Image: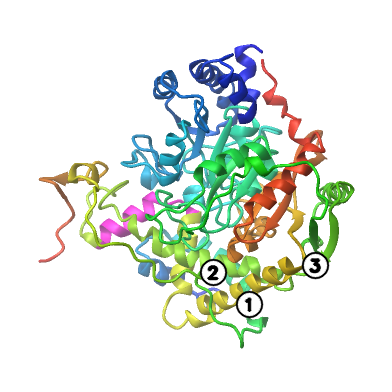
Amino acid sequence: MAGTSELDVGYVARLARINLTEEEANAFQKQLDDVLKYVEKLRQADVSHVEAAAHALPIFNVFREDAASEWFTAEQALSNAPRKANDLFIVPKVVE
Amino acid sequence: MTEKDLPALSIADLQSLLRSREVSAREVVDALRARIEAVDGEIGAYLSVDMDAAAKEAEKANVDLPLGGVPLAIKDIINVMGQPCTCGSKILHGHRATYDATVIQKLRAAGAIPFGKTNLDEFAMGSSTENSAMKLTRNPWDLSRVPGGSSGGSAAAVAADVAFGALGSDTGGSIRQPAALSGVVGFKPTYGRVSRFGLVAFASSLDQIGPLTKTVRDSALIMNVIAGHDPQDSTSLNEPVPDYAAKLGNDLRGVRLGVPKEYMIEGTDPQVKAAITAAVKQMNSLGAEIVDVSLPHTDYAVAVYYILATAEASANLARFDGVRYGYRAENPRDVLDLYGRTRQEGFGPEVKRRVILGTYVLSSGYYDAYYLRAQKVRELIRRDFAKAFAKVDALISPTSPVPAFKLGERTAEPLQMYLADIFTIAANLAGICGISLPCGFAEVDGHRLPVGLQLLGKPLDEARILQIAHAYEQSTDWHKARPPIASPK
């Protein structure tokens, strides 16, 4: 379905791996159309002489020594897993 | 001073009693427990507390450490080992942190006792704490109103004297706005000043941890402990940390304060405007010079924010897929069904909206028009502040255009909720520091609702912002006012 913007909520929700009910999709379409209409004001800004800022502060290429250190045990890493066995996360079959 | 009066104390006053051995850390924890049991049923600030563990820690507390024996509340988006970390989301229901965030390690090393987790908008997305999947938090000044958000549990806890102080996180105003609406002090440090390691990521280029407290001095005391470089966070700044509390003073001579004309907009509540105008006069009388300044790209800030923050959120929240932790949909047909239903059933509506919007603005064909353009306008906003700070030491504005609004009043229209952050968002985009502190009240429907004053400062100029805030605070009685629910029963 389409609203007043080019956003197709159903399609983008699939990209984002979120299933939606029809009611959710309809409500979000309207609400996000409003938001996209609001952000259109950015078209008025003159950005012809500006570099994009990914961060507020100029920090680049942070390196550390490639040294081993203490980290989670398998038991800790798995402690919140919804399903696990033999020190592994259990998921549905991925390959046929 | 009886035990039931203890929870009303500031951290600094509590420390005097602890260090003179007039009270023990154990008595403090017991008093806080009693206070939480008496009051938090009405406020709903906490998602979980572990007072038994806190009592044990109190028994061995060294009260001479910088925060020795001081119990602190932690927004439930910061990992505290062994305690739940739900982010206010069904998708992390039952999740327990397997490690301490860097800020928690630092608090523990300084003797503090992180004993409880406070409510928040799901994944810190919201301005009223109503997006929590867990419970409603009420404003201690008027229980029919929101405490602000997203750190609404932390703000309400401090305001209602069920916490001596708390940590929150601020991505677009989530410390300062609830501090303003709940009548407490909320401090957002410079981006990179405090480690984000162990803070569940919402928008990584904007998120920053900071304190919510009863006084400016208390925020300085917590900043002394949590600020500083952390090799675990590559965006953390490797800069020396001053003693913020030692630099606090009472006069403002030689300080230049800017009033941005774009922040005195139509639509700001007249009582809020009046309180800010009075505060500016007061600072002038303390010696500050008041200068008019302009931040010409202010009107773009909310639009830039909702593109960049949702884009970053859509990437950060991809990890919640039902595989490694948290909620998992039952009986998935295949792996796509597992992802799609886990996220449908686990996320609330605001998180879904933002992940969808963020995915859209990053998608092929729209990236340049939305994401790239927003990054460029972000740079224009950053330059606005740099120009203003060439003329003044700090900027003054309201924290929020309105006092606390009614529960349910803005939930149907997300865009209206987003506009509640109009004065706080730009500071995150520019990476600068800022504070909100009480500066008066608005009378609404027979209730006194707190008004917050925002001061914004240059990157890494936390010490100066705290000084200015402290000097103003000490010249007023606003910070001494307590909500009706805070008077001991």
C-alpha gap between disc 3 and disc 1: 22 Å
Name the spot of residue B406 as percent of width and height, x first: 69, 42
Answer with the quarter of the image where residue B143 lies: top right
The mark tally for this picture is: 3
Residue furthest bottom in the image: A48
Q: Which residue is mark 1?
A: A42
Q: Amino acid at mark 1?
A: Leu
Question: Which chain does tag 3 point to?
Answer: B
Circle 1 crowding by C-alpha within 10 Å: few under 14, some 14–19, many from 20 = many
Name the spot of residue B340 as percent of width and height, x first: 32, 59
Q: Magenta stretch containing residue B340, yes or no?
A: yes
Question: Which chain does tag 1 point to?
Answer: A
Find numbered disc 1 in the image and state the secondary structure of the residue it sits on. Answer: helix
Q: Amino acid at mark 2?
A: Ile
Which mark is nearer the camera, 3 or 2?
3
> What's the magenta region?
B336-349
Q: Amino acid at mark 3?
A: Val
Question: Do we see residue A1 in this rendering?
Answer: no
Mark carried by residue B293: 3
Q: Are marks 3 and 1 in contact (CB under 8 Å)?
A: no
Q: Quick check: B470 above or below A15?
A: above
